[in-house]
Image (spheres, rainbow, N blue to C red):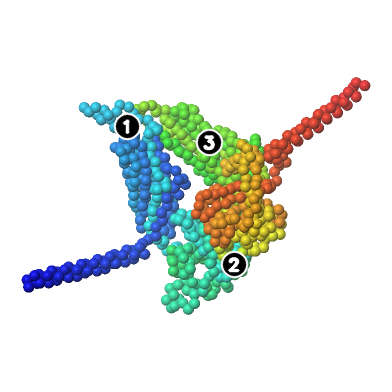
């Protein structure tokens, strides 16, 4: 009986324990569900994050090399005024030398003028990782400067008194063991925040199309009906205007049809500016709506329509996403629309300071061709201030540098003997060592030097430097004047005063260009990628026609994205522009053509002129250099002088035939002569499908791919950095040079022709001299 009671008691205890465990599990489950729900809600409400690798900010994937006793390296971070910051974090990974003295060596990080971190450089722990929270209150719209400052030493401080000195020598500030490297790939800046409500004013167009935008800039062009060729042109003009404001950041453009919102509620009618416009498909992008007043009135309302009287531009915050804007490009008629679309690329003054404006009476022919203020012309003397240069003074042992940007015409050809003459007005301080100099660089390449030879200092009103014109390249060039100054008292353990190390370069210095001619060898897609030539430079001479293989929205958006990139590299939109859809043959020779479309939609006859003849049965071109000396030499760094600069053409060609087009997921761009039927120059962009075309053109506009476009055939894939470029097609020439330069060009391109002409000339000269001698004998010896 007792045993039975004990068994019952044990069973009750076991049941109570099981019930308690089940209750505990249920409680834990409910608690975990609550935590997960809270976390999910927090994740949904979390501000968006933008992470920018340091390599993107400094333009290099190699580490930042901080050498010497002290080095300063600034990094500039763009910040749009449209972004409200919540948190900014700098993640830094670095490696320092194991020879440094830990107590004296450090890496200081500044945000603008404020010190935000001091990191010891420990030789015992040479690999460092730091997460630095940057104060958001110190960020300002524009470009913010993060400065890495290193102080590096390899000798300890001397210990005085009765203690034995640890070291008895001074240190060399340029010792090779003084170094720290910052990893640009794994270091990054992370931003957390959200877009604030836009300020919809036409005067703030630079802040709406903001070049300081973090990440990719996406824009949707919305039309009330499917675009025809005229509306496609307007989309291209709008994209180019936005691209000019964005400067270096190419816009990624898409196309949508406007949707009418049926039966809006009373709340929507009361709170929305455009209640009849369905904004649900805008998807977190800025939107530009293009259409005539009568076409947009059902979408934007009768009250809006009353405000349109001529070429109309308006900017408004989106009703459902006030962090993005709606821009309306409209007008009473087609001419008004054309003017309004062109004006986006022209507004560079903070007026009108209002959400919308009518530019009544303005005609398209009033808008003259754009020009670049840095563009130079033949046999003209320019002062540095003509290019925006300001007098600058450099001070201290670190010296400094000043830069001057000037633009050589893209179709420039120069003779071998032509030079650029630079006359400098400068002054430098006294007490400099004899190895103090000012180095002159052209596009990062050392060209010339001035030595500061006077110990008492000197003011020089005119110092002439001559540089071969061939050292420049077509398009934008950068001249860098870099002073390297060392104090006269620079021996070991001497007190160094570097406040006397001064160099001033004045803005009334001059530069004279000579020897430029209008002649260029084509095709040359590197020239197009750098300058937009021939589409943007001579757009007042030959109109540009964009031919689309189909009127697909994706194809149209791809063409707009490409046109935006061309406007950026030339710094202005293409004015003389038209679109054709489906058929663009018989253009004649007085236009330049850009053909865009999936490969099956483009004209078969066009491919017969191209270097790669694609079709149902394609003819490819495989090449091999036949001997040493045939390698291609890049044209990026120098002007075209002669064919010898770029390798000969002793190349073996193999032409296999392929069933099908063979493009797969690749994008292809080719350039060739239109042969009088498709214009003077044709640039063709294609892929297998419209989706592949759009993806590859988006990739094409990135710096990694665009900087590798060259030759007359370039192939690449979306998501990959490999670019394949070749020169396969026939050459042709554009421009009208002087007769002497034309002869020099062709003789240098064809040495055999030059030798043949020279031999023929010598033979003619010999026969002429022989004839003269015979006449002399006959006259004086008979």
User: Residue 410, percent across and down?
Assistant: 62, 47
On the question of residue 758 being in view, the answer is yes
Image disc number at residue 227: 2
If you read the primary sequence from the N terminus, does the residue marked by circle 2 or circle 1 appear first? 1
Query: In the displayed structure, does residue 565 sit left or right of residue 13?
Result: right
User: For the residue carrying disc 1, how many other residues have a C-alpha within 10 Å: few (<14), some (14-19), or many (20+)?
Assistant: some
Residue linked to disc 1: 155
If you read the primary sequence from the N terminus, does the residue marked by circle 3 or circle 1 appear first? 1
CA gap between label 2 and label 3 equals 52 Å
Residue linked to disc 3: 446
- What residue appears at the point 64 percent right and 60 percent down from the top-left corner? 602
Find numbered disc 3 in the image and state the secondary structure of the residue it sits on.
strand
Find numbered disc 2 in the image and state the secondary structure of the residue it sits on.
loop
Query: In the displayed structure, does residue 206 sit left or right of residue 168?
Result: right
Q: Residue furthest right?
A: 782
Instruction: Say which of 175 and 608 sits in front.
Output: 608
Res 199 → quadrant: bottom left
User: Residue 769, percent across and down?
Assistant: 82, 28
Res 494 → quadrant: top left
């Amino acid at each position: 009986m007792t045993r039975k009671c004990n068994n019952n008691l044990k069973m009750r205890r076991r049941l109570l324990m099981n019930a308690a465990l089940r209750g505990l599990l249920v409680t834990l489950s409910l608690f975990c569900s609550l935590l997960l729900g809270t976390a999910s809600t927090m994740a949904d409400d979390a501000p968006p994050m933008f992470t920018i690798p340091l390599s993107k900010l400094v333009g290099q994937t190699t580490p930042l090399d901080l050498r010497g006793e002290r080095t300063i390296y600034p990094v500039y971070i763009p910040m749009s005024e449209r972004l409200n910051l919540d948190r900014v974090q700098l993640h830094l990974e670095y490696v320092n030398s194991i020879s440094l003295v830990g107590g004296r060596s450090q890496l200081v990080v500044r945000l603008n003028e404020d010190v935000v971190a001091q990191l010891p450089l420990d030789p015992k722990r040479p690999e460092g990782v730091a997460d630095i929270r940057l104060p958001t209150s110190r960020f300002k719209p524009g470009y913010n400067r993060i400065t890495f400052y290193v102080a590096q030493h390899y000798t300890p401080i001397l210990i005085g008194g009765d203690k034995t000195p640890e070291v008895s020598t001074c240190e060399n500030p340029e010792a090779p063991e003084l170094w720290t490297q910052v990893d640009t790939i794994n270091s990054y800046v992370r931003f957390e925040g959200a877009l604030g409500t836009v300020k919809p004013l036409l005067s703030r167009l630079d802040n709406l199309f903001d070049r300081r935008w973090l990440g990719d800039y996406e824009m949707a062009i919305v039309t009330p009906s499917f675009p025809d060729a005229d509306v496609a042109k307007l989309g291209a003009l709008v994209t180019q205007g936005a691209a000019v404001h964005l400067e270096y950041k190419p816009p990624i453009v898409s196309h949508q049809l406007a949707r009418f919102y049926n039966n809006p509620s009373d709340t929507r009618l009361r709170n929305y500016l455009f209640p009849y416009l369905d904004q649900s498909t805008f998807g977190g992008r800025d939107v530009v709506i293009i259409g005539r007043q009568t076409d947009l009135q059902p979408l934007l309302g009768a009250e809006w329509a009353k405000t349109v009287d001529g070429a109309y531009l308006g900017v408004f915050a989106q009703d459902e996403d006030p962090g993005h804007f709606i821009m309306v490009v409209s007008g009473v008629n087609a001419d008004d629309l054309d003017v309004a679309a062109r004006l986006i690329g022209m507004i560079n003054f903070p007026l009108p300071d209002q959400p919308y404006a009518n530019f009544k009476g303005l005609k398209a022919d009033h808008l003259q061709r754009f020009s670049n203020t840095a563009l130079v012309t033949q046999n003209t003397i320019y002062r540095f201030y003509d290019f925006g240069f300001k007098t600058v003074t450099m001070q201290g042992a670190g010296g400094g540098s000043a830069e001057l940007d000037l633009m050589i015409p893209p179709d420039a050809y120069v003779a071998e003997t032509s030079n650029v003459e630079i006359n400098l007005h400068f002054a430098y301080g006294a007490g400099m060592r004899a190895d103090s100099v000012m180095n002159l660089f052209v596009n990062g390449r050392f060209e010339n030097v001035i030595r500061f030879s006077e110990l008492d200092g000197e003011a020089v009103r005119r110092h002439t430097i001559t540089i071969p014109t061939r050292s420049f390249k077509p398009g934008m060039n950068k001249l860098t004047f870099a002073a390297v100054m060392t104090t006269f008292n620079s021996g070991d353990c001497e007190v160094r005063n570097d406040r006397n190390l001064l160099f001033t370069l004045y803005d009334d210095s001059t530069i004279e260009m000579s020897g430029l001619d209008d002649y260029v060898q084509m095709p040359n897609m590197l020239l197009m990628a750098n300058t937009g030539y021939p589409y943007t430079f001579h757009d007042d001479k030959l109109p540009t026609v964009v031919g689309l293989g189909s009127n697909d929205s994706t194809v149209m958006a791809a063409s707009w994205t490409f046109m935006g990139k061309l406007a950026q590299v030339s710094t202005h939109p293409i004015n003389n522009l038209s679109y054709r859809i489906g058929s663009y043959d018989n253009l004649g020779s007085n236009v330049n053509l850009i053909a865009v479309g999936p490969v099956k939609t483009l004209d078969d006859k066009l491919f017969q002129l191209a270097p790669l003849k694609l079709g149902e049965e394609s003819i490819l071109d495989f090449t091999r250099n036949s001997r040493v000396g045939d390698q291609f030499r890049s044209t990026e760094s120098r002007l075209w002088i002669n064919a010898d600069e770029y390798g000969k053409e002793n190349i073996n060609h193999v032409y296999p035939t392929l069933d099908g087009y063979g493009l797969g997921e690749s994008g292809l761009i080719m350039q060739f002569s239109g042969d009088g039927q498709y214009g003077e120059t044709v640039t063709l962009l294609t892929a297998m499908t419209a989706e592949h075309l759009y993806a590859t053109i988006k990739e094409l506009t990135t710096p990694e791919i665009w900087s590798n476009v060259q030759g007359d055939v370039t192939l690449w894939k979306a998501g990959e950095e490999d670019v394949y470029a070749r020169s396969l097609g026939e050459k042709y020439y554009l421009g009208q040079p002087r007769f002497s330069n034309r002869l020099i060009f062709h003789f240098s391109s064809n040495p055999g022709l030059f030798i043949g002409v020279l031999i023929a000339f010598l033979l003619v000269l010999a026969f002429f001299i022989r004839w003269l001698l015979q006449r002399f004998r006959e006259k004086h010896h008979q």
